[in-house]
Image (cartoon, helix red, strand yellow):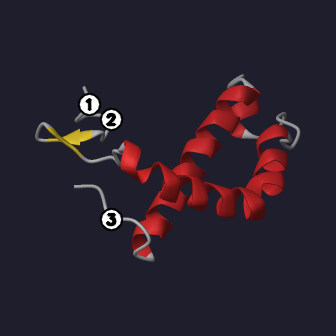
Amino acid sequence: MLDFFGYTKGGKLCVPVYYKKDLEAIREIESVIEAYLFEDVKNRLTSFPPAANLTYGKHSVPVGEIGNELYHILFGFINSELVRRKLVCPPV
């Protein structure tokens, strides 16, 4: 099941794993990202256009589910960008 959802590949993790020794660096990265993005992200995840003519509205998808999905997309993008800029190592 973990392979199916992309958390493992062939029984090996392919998502970031953080250790206690990494927490200081993680907190520094977090504070920079939060300083630049928090308000925009909060506003985007809590205000959606009227659902009537959008697919999620036509299928009665709860707004919270849309926010959760957008959060995961953003989280994945930020992680990819950190790897691309060589600020963190890519998952193995």
Q: Which residue lies at the image location 40% right of the left edge and 65% below the top edge? A: 88
The residue labelled by disc 1 is: 2
Is the residue 86 above or below the residue 18 in the image?
Answer: below
For the N terminus, the image quarter is: top left
Closest to the camera, between mark 3 and mark 1, is 3
Q: Is residue 30 left or right of residue 67?
A: left
At label 2, counting other C-alpha atoms closer than 10 Å, the crowd grade (few under 14, some 14-19, many 20 or more) is: few
Gap in angstroms between the C-alphas marked 2 and 1: 5 Å
Q: Position of residue 33 (x, y in %)?
A: 66, 61
- Could you say whether the residue bearing mark 1 is in a helix, strand or loop? loop
Gap in angstroms between the C-alphas marked 3 and 1: 21 Å
Q: Is residue 50 left or right of residue 37?
A: right
Q: For this rendering, which residue is in front, 67 or 59?
A: 67
Q: Position of residue 84 (x, y in %)?
A: 42, 74
At label 1, counting other C-alpha atoms closer than 10 Å, the crowd grade (few under 14, some 14-19, many 20 or more) is: few
Q: Are marks 2 and 1 in contact (CB under 8 Å)?
A: yes
Amino acid at circle 3: Cys
Gap in angstroms between the C-alphas marked 2 and 3: 21 Å
- Could you say whether the residue bearing mark 3 is in a helix, strand or loop? loop
Amino acid at circle 2: Phe
The residue labelled by disc 3 is: 89
Q: Position of residue 2 (x, y in %)?
A: 26, 31
Q: Which residue lies at the image location 88% right of the left edge and 38% below the top edge? A: 50
Q: Which residue lies at the image location 82% right of the left edge and 35% below the top edge? A: 51
Q: For this rendering, which residue is in front, 77 or 28?
A: 28
**If you read the primary sequence from the N terminus, does the residue marked by circle 2 or circle 3 appear first?**
2
Task: Choose top left, top right, bottom left or bottom right for residue 28.
Answer: bottom right
Q: Which residue lies at the image location 63% right of the left edge and 34% below the top edge? A: 68
Task: Choose top left, top right, bottom left or bottom right for residue 54.
Answer: top right
Amino acid at circle 1: Leu
Q: Is residue 5 left or right of residue 43?
A: left
